[in-house]
Image (cartoon, rainbow, N blue to C red):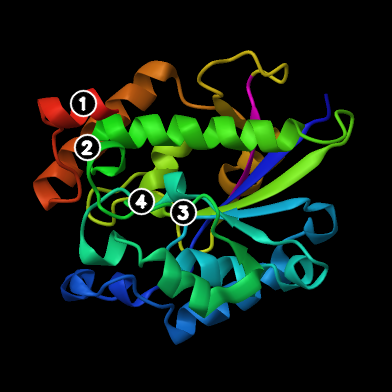
Amino acid sequence: MGKITIHCVRHAQGYHNLCEANHRLPDPDLTELGVQQCTTLSEQFPYHSKITDLVASPLRRTLYTCILSFPDEVARGLVITALPELQETSDLPCDTGSAREVLEKEFGSKVDFQRVQDGWNNKQGRWSPAAAAIEARARDARLFLRDLGSSGDEDRDREIVVVTHGGYLHYFTEDWEGNDKFTGTGWANTEWRSYQFVDQEGKDANASLKETPESRIRRVGHEHPLSEAEQRNLRSSAEEGWKESGFQKPADADQEAKL
């Protein structure tokens, strides 16, 4: 089995990032600065020639970040897979995606929306802003990416770009370091980090990830991760802050049953 590397990217600045009032904007676009951030990421990202797959949350800001930050990959024919499991955590208008037909008209053949089915943006059941639901779909996303990375030539290394959201990335990577209760994330706009599966044999039912030593050294100066206890404490603090801010809601019994 070839090695699978996942390059996680937080989207560029959107209009909802400018002020709290803009959280009412539905599925907002990138700001002018956000577009510039994509250009900078494209210029600085060192692995363009190695990328085999592009995957993104179906929200407009993540799709545009992927298209603008990885233009060479798009130009050589890589179609972006829109994966609804990667959508942001809250049910605010800014974190609620547009209807599939609207997105298909806007993005055309650059994006494959086959996995975006009716109800993906209703923020109920498995799509709800409850911690258990977010955790479950983050696991589903990792499993999908592991299957994607192991498809085709089994001996071929796969390098997958995943463009998603700051709050969600903590669940996806299971890394809560740097999380800030006021911004909702420890990831900067267009920040990228590289990960590989803890179990390269594909037997881990959780499909947990670990940051590569090169990635961690690049951003924090060393490769030593936090302990499990430290991660649990950080997650507890982050989720409490999100609930206070309205970004996350407790699941009711009906929601739990649907997960």
Q: How far apart are marks 1 and 2 (CA)?
A: 9 Å
- Quarter of the image for residue 22 reads bottom left
Residue 20 location (% of width, % of height): 18, 70
Residue 232 location (% of width, % of height): 32, 23
Residue position for label 3:
116
Closer mark to the observer between disc 1 and disc 2 = 1
The residue positioned 28% from the left and 57% from the top of the image is 183
Disc 3 to disc 4: CB gap under 8 Å: yes
* Mark 2 neighbour class, 10 Å CA radius: few under 14, some 14 to 19, many 20 or more: many
Quarter of the image where the N terminus is located: top right
Q: Which of 85 and 223 is in front in this view?
A: 85
Q: What residue type is labelled 3?
A: Val
Q: Which amino acid does label 1 sit on?
A: Glu
Closer mark to the observer between disc 3 and disc 1 = 3
Residue 13 location (% of width, % of height): 42, 72
Secondary structure beneath dot 3 equals: loop
Work out whether residue 91 can be spotted: yes
Q: Please, which residue is most extreme toward the bottom here? A: 32
Residue position for label 4:
120
Residue position for label 1:
256
